[in-house]
Amino acid sequence: MSFEPKILGFLCNWCSYAGADLAGVSRVQYPPNIRVIRVMCSGRVDPMFIFKALQVGADGVIVMGCHIGDCHYLEGNYEAVNKFAMTKKFLELIGLDNRIRLEWVSASEGTRYGAVVTEFTEYIKSLGPNPAKTDNTILNKLKAVDVAAATERMRSLVGRQRKITEQENVYGEKVPLEEFNAIFDGAIKDEYERAEIFLALEDKNKSVKELAKELDIDPSIVLEHLLILKQRMQVDFGEIIENTPIFVRM
Amino acid sequence: MSEKSVIIIGAGIAGIQAALDLGDMGIKVHLVEKQSCIGGRMAQLDKTFPTLDCSICILAPKLSECYRHKNITLYTLSEVQKVEGSAGNFTVEVLKHPRYIKEGVCTNCGDCGVICPVRGVTNFFDADLATQSAAQIAFPAAVPPTYRINPEVCLYLNYGICGLCYNNCGADAIDFSMKESVLTLDNVGSIIIATGLDLAEDIHGLNVYGYHKYANVITAMELERLICASGPQDGHLSRLSDGKHPHKIAMLQCIDSRTQKGQQYCSSICCMYTTKEAIVAYEHDNTLETYVFYIDMRAGGKGFQKFLRRGAEEYNIKYIKSKISHIEVDDNDNPIITYDDLETGKVKQMTVDLAVLATCIIPSRSIEKLSKILGVNLNKYEYVDTNPFLPVETSVDGIFTCGCAREPMDIPRSVAEASGAAARAAEIIKGG
Amino acid sequence: MSEEEKTEEEIRVGVFICHCGSNIGGYIDCKEVAERAKKLPNVVFTQDNLYTCSETGLAQIKNGIKEHNLNRIVVASCTPRTHEPLFRSCIEEAGLNPYLFNFVNIRDQNTWVHQKHTAEAFDKANELVKMGTAKASRLEALDKIIVDATPTALVIGGGISGITSALNLANQGFETHLVEKEAELGGNLRNLNRLFPTDQSASELLDGLKQKVSSNSKLTVYTSARVKSIEGFVGNYEIEVDQGGTVKELKIGIIIVAVGAVPFIPTGLLGYDGQKSITQNELEAKLKAGEAIPKNIVMVQCVGSRIEERKYCSSVCCMTALKNALAIKEKNPDANITILFRDLYTPGTHYEDYYRRTREAGVVFVEYAPEKMPALEGDKVKVHNEFLGEDILIPCDLLVLSVPLVSNDDNKDLAQMLKVPLEENGFFLEAHVKLRPMDFATDGVFVCGSAKWPVDITEAITQGYAAGSRASTIISHKTLEVEGATSSLPDYNRSLCTGCEVCITVCPYKAINKDENDEIVILQVLCKGCGVCGATCTNHAIVIRHFTDEQILSEILAFGGE
């Protein structure tokens, strides 16, 4: 039996859900793989929803909203763009970024909805099943990405992105997008590594050396991350064995 | 001193919309309907143009809202029989025909319809293409959700025999002792006429087109019921002569309209609804070819031109500018259409499996009597006479009109006009 | 009737699977879907109905609630976008809070679109019901928010439709404000000579209306004025009107958009030069001014409309041409008038009669096909006629082009201010073409006349009344109920809030502030429930009611098979 992908769609009530209904009214036919969760705005789609979906077995996740400029809530879809970009950057670290998609479908685009769903389903089918379903290493990486994206730092950055780059930061400076992205991309890498470290301490308390070897990260960087995690009260020193501190999860 | 109310005569989509608007404004509404259920013509349609919405799907919530609205009282199987007074203070007599089944008690289970021995009663709702018994309901989702006993054919009411329904009704809802009753409604501020439309075939034989002569020449309304998913053929279109699926259909525009021999005016909606019907039929069978024979294609409403283009590009519909001469049939009952092809100037013939007549819509037959009771003028076409720049006002102060009672028009216009009539009626009630 | 709050009690879910006649039932086994739903967590009752939205179906839901003590209801049928309010009202009538209802779409997004894959559609229906039931189990009772409604109206645009609307509202007793950007009221009516189908004088009609407007004590008119800003929401707008530099602040309950449309200028088409090749509007100006009209007139229909760039039919141009043709014939019975057309748009009773009159007056009608547009060649017009199979040369002293009405350039700005959409031709897009033709999806704003789609005077008038009626359903009441599914920062989450203010940054409606104690406050009446703040909040302190993280995650987990 050939692989039939499980597709999860988040559709905004006013545009894409209406477009999907119009596809129905117009009897536009498309593959039956998609399951839809209705939200009021594409901006409601929290990155954690996408990570969760991939963790529970979605082969593809598609977020649909109103065309830019046409959001029923004015700017919600701009926020959706930024959240989705962050989600994608995190998934790039673990090779799952091609399994998510952001598309704009308006209330009058019934035919387009069918076309988008058809194309996405066929694309995901060509990729094969989500490896996180069978490969525990990848599943664990997915969990790390979920944890990383959920940090206050990442959520704060992505939430302030538009304000900082289009208006001003708290110092009254407008930060150019490239500069912002440089900081942002650095943060993504850092938080992911921190999340990996945090999750690696779940089964057993470990030393810097052990963590560095297990996760293939430079030991001095591991130490830096651990100190930040200690600041955040997520880890602490456990015991010291032969001059080597062992870290423990809080 | 009770508050002023509005009486709306006719509970099709226009009457319903006006009732809902006025009810939402806090004004009491009496909605009078001659049939046993509300919804009018729109309930008979499968889909509506140009959105191809399922008609009953968008209508049903409005029917329910009307039925449950605290400011709207429904009178079905009723008609206005007398009006006195003037704008701001009418007194209206409503004659209520007996349903013989108690509203509110009947659970709409349908047992009476099944057990009734009288069969073959034609159902107006299905354009007389289906039959039912003497205990009947117009369609399953009808509002009010109550059966009725048809006194013209009921054995008990005519001959004093049978009574099976009465003996078997689980809810004890049957009451043969019901009689006609007259209600007097006073302190009526204004009246809205929303009696809607009937069809040309109700008054003319259409012989030259072979209607009622050849089984495979049908009217648009009949086609509508046949392609309707909840109609007599469940939407699987079959010819009435031999049950075969037609693969080549002709739609003939302007039947009995724009002609000295019938109605002189344009029926407005047929150009659009034939494309709609062709699209719906094509969805059931995509080997279908449809030919629309037309004089002028009239599609000026929002999204209408796009709709016609879709028909031509995606649904195998071909439009032929023409004038129809007559219809005959061959040995297999296939209609042969003789027509003047206006693009080439030649007289041609086309043989098809099914010919559909887009017949002219006419004002409801009840308007003649009603206009006399209300004292409103009708124009020469028997539509309620209005001034184009005072479009919802009749010749009588305080009596308004809207929708197809006034002029042939489609659903969006009827809905807008109904709100318009409600606005004028509200001025009288609220403005004082 | 008080609502029984059962949120602390055992969750008892009732699931109703609709056949929708054969729209769903004809493709999948609804009975079986209902059977399988019985096994879902928290489900205590399931049923399949023929038409759940019918009176019978609604009664079955109410019965189910009573008999089985249900406190969460799931209906699987068509789409929440049309039927959610109906089912919410239904369960409210049965004593449940209306927000304890969830809708599962197994028709528009299932059976209708997977017609050749009924087995998969069946599986999909079951899974969607599972997801919908998971969410329903976690729904909470919500209260609607009640706000005052200001009984005043603002009409933007003082053409025939706007005037009609404004007069109607004023006559109903509402304080009404009419804003017009030009120095005079009337819109396109000011430029017209006569009006079809009665040939009544346009200025007579307009003068009559102006009289009514000026003598109406409840109606205030602002000419040479524009709407500068719009704040607030239905029933509670704060609007600034700029009249030549002076800004007036108004408290408004509802807004009606009646900004009309403008005639297209056919630059580059059929030798348009405003002299020998003019538009119908320009012809009417000449007729109105009593200018001499030359003998040989050719009119061309559908210039700039029903073409690739502008696919629509503007509906008024055919009658306009006939009207002007008759006006010319009246002045000069010897005039030779030829109208070149594709399809003549004269629907209904009055207009068909008018067409007949025009033919009887001797106006000649020649059909042309859009692939072979007529052309002006010197003092003749060349047109190809399919019927004859030849080109015809028609003597032409004056070529009159019937052009469509097109949307105003500034519709975009107004649409942005009002947060309402435009369709592809720039006209305002109503909530639903058939059943809500005067409403916008946004509450409190309505539209009428050519701002929505080109219409003739009759329809502009009825639509003006209609908008008045629709608006009145809102401002006829002292208070308004606002949806309860808004964003909130509940007390039990206060400790999670770090005061980072990122929510304030992202709210499109400026509905979030900090109060004098530096605590985050979400203004319920301004909140539209988009949920962006919830998706952004750095600590998940904000709860988006009816679309909470927990509810959505439960749908995701159910999707995953849990």
Image (cartoon, grey):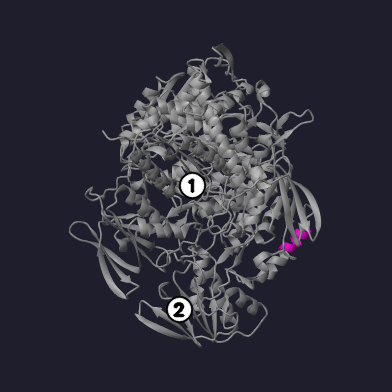
The amino acid marked with disc number 1 is: Val
Q: Are marks 2 and 1 on the same chain?
A: no
Q: Badge 2: how crowded within 10 Å, few (<14), some, or many (20+)? A: many
**Residue sticking out furthest to the right:** C246
Regarding residue B103, the answer to whether it shows in the image is no
Q: Chain of mark 2?
A: C
Residue C408 is situated, as x and y percent measured from the top left of the image, at 62, 62
Residue under the point 52% across and 64% down: C315
Residue name at image x 71 percent, y 31 percent: C521
Residue stretch rendered in magenta on the structure: C209-215
Is C58 left or right of C426, judged from the image as shown? Answer: left
Q: Nearer the viewer, residue B402 or C378?
A: C378
Q: Is residue C7 magenta?
A: no
- Pointer 2 residue: C374
Subunit that carries the residue with mark 1: A
Q: Position of residue C525 (x, y in %)?
A: 69, 36
Residue B77: tell me if it is visible: yes
For residue B329, above or below residue B135: below
Question: Which residue corresponds to the image point at 39% horizontal and 40% vertical from the top-left?
Answer: B152
Between residues C382 and C135, which one lies in front from this camera angle? C135
| In-image side of B71 versus A51 (left or right) | right
Quadrant for the C terminus of chain A in the image: top right
Quadrant location of the N terminus of chain A?
A: top left
Based on the picture, tell me whether residue C212 belongs to the magenta stretch: yes
Q: Are marks 2 and 1 in contact (CB under 8 Å)?
A: no
Q: Quadrant of residue A150?
A: top right
Q: Position of residue C1 (x, y in %)?
A: 62, 24
Distance from disc 2 to disc 1, alpha carbons, whole Å, reads: 40 Å
Compared across the picture, whether C295 is left or right of B274 comes to: right
User: Which residue sits furthest front?
Assistant: A242
What is the number of the mark on residue A105? 1
